[in-house]
Image (cartoon, rainbow, N blue to C red):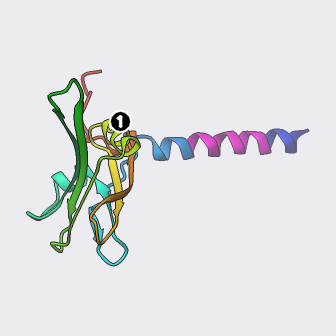
Amino acid sequence: MRLKTKILTTGLAAAFFSTAAIAGMVQPLPVDVDLTTSFAHGDMLSARYAPNKNEFIGCGVRKFDDGMGGAIAFGFCQAEDADGERAFCNTDNEDLLDAIEASADYGYISFSWDEKTQECRRIGFSNQSFYVPPNVGSNL
């Protein structure tokens, strides 16, 4: 019985300390553009505070009145890494536009494109606490 109690106590202590060790975790991911695979990714916070003047990453949507009661919409993603490699893609695919519109501040972005048409093939976002800068919400 004592062995089971000791194992349980040790397990609970390990679980507590492992949780405490990752509390407040940050995960910087500098922008990387790979032109050979037509893939770019990185997080917005790392790009914003990069120690170089090149780095950026982001996506956006533009909508225009078509004059007939509807709208024309297109989206794009763009990035440049520290080495100056630059990527751009555009899309009018409604599902990819929805993905862009679902993004949030400080997130991780990844996208890929067709090399010939520059059309976006995949757009991904990850909005998690470890991408939020310190002091945001510090008055809570």
Which residue is situated farthest in the front direction here? 68
Q: Could you tell whether 67 is left or right of 24 in the image?
A: left
Vertical relation: 110 (above or below) 115: above
Residue at 47 percent across and 46 percent down: it is 22
Residue 3 in view of the camera: yes
> Toward the viewer: 68 or 31?
68
Q: Could you tell whether 131 is left or right of 54 in the image?
A: right
Q: Position of residue 115 (x, y in %)?
A: 30, 71
Q: Position of residue 40 (x, y in %)?
A: 31, 63
Q: How many marks?
A: 1
Within the image, what quadrant is residue 71 found in?
top left
Q: Main secondary structure of the magenta part?
A: helix
Within the image, what quadrant is residue 32 found in?
bottom left
**Callout 1: helix, strand or loop?**
loop
> Toward the viewer: 84 or 61?
61
Which residue is label 1 attached to?
A: 102
> Toward the viewer: 58 or 49?
58
Q: Which portion, as a residue range, is magenta?
A: 7-17
Q: Could you tell whether 7 is left or right of 98 in the image?
A: right
Residue at 73 percent across and 39 percent down: it is 9
User: Is residue 90 one of those drawn in magenta?
Assistant: no
Q: Position of residue 35 (x, y in %)?
A: 29, 75
Q: Could you tell whether 15 is left or right of 133 in the image?
A: right
Query: Where does the C terminus fall, quadrant-wise?
Result: top left
Q: Position of residue 106 (x, y in %)?
A: 27, 42
